[in-house]
C-alpha cells in the first residue's frame, strides 16, 4: 500500500504545519485528515495533490482522526472540489455532536460566528 504526506501550513501555531496523508484506495484516493480551513492550506493541498498526479475529483474518501480544527475544517473545501465520503470515529463524534452532520453544522456555525464567509473565497 502506498501513501504520501502533504504538509499544510498551520498559521499561528508553534508546529507550523499539519500533515494530510494520501492513500490509494480501490476506487480512487483517500485523505487522512483534512487540514485547517485557510486559503494557503487549500492551495497547498491542491498543489500537493497535483505534484502526486492526483486530481481533486479522484479523492473518494476523507478519514478524520479527531475533531480539532486543524484536522477537520478544510473538509468543507474538499467537499466542494471533490465528492468524497467522510469518515470519523463514532467516539470522536459523540464527544461533541450526535452525528457527523451535527458536527459539521456546529463547525460551520462557529466559523460564521468568527466572520467566515458562507462560500469558499480567496481573502482580499
Image (spheres, grey):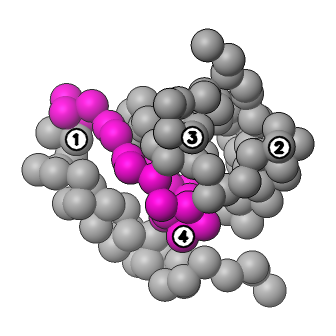
The residue to which callout 1 is attached is 93
The stretch in magenta equals 71-92
From the image, which quarter does the N terminus lie in? top right
The residue to which callout 3 is attached is 28
Q: Label 4 crowding class (10 Å Cα cut-off): few <14, some 14-19, many 20+?
A: few
In the figure, 57 relative to 33: above or below?
A: below
In the figure, 63 relative to 108: above or below?
A: above
The residue to which callout 2 is attached is 53
In the figure, 21 relative to 54: above or below?
A: above
Badge 1 marks a residue whose secondary structure is helix
Q: Nearer the viewer, mark 2 or mark 4?
A: 2
Mark toward the start of the polypeptide (2 vs 4): 2
Indicate yes or no whether the magenta region holds residue 46. no
In the image, 117 versus 78, the foreground residue is: 78
Q: Position of residue 61 (x, y in %)?
A: 46, 43
How far is the residue under mark 1 from the one under mark 4? 22 Å
The residue to which callout 4 is attached is 80
Amino acid at each position: 500500500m502506498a501513501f504520501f504526506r502533504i504538509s499544510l501550513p498551520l498559521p499561528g501555531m508553534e508546529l507550523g504545519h499539519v500533515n494530510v496523508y494520501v492513500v490509494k484506495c480501490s476506487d480512487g484516493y483517500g485523505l487522512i485528515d483534512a487540514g485547517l480551513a485557510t486559503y494557503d492550506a487549500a492551495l497547498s493541498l491542491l498543489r500537493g495533490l497535483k505534484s502526486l498526479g492526483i486530481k481533486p475529483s479522484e479523492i473518494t474518501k476523507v478519514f478524520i482522526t479527531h475533531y480539532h480544527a486543524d484536522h477537520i475544517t478544510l473538509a468543507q473545501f474538499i467537499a466542494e472540489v471533490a465528492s468524497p465520503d467522510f469518515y470519523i470515529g463514532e467516539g470522536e463524534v459523540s464527544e461533541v455532536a450526535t452525528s457527523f452532520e451535527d458536527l459539521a453544522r456546529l463547525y460551520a456555525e462557529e466559523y460564521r460566528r468568527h466572520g467566515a464567509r458562507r462560500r469558499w473565497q480567496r481573502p482580499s
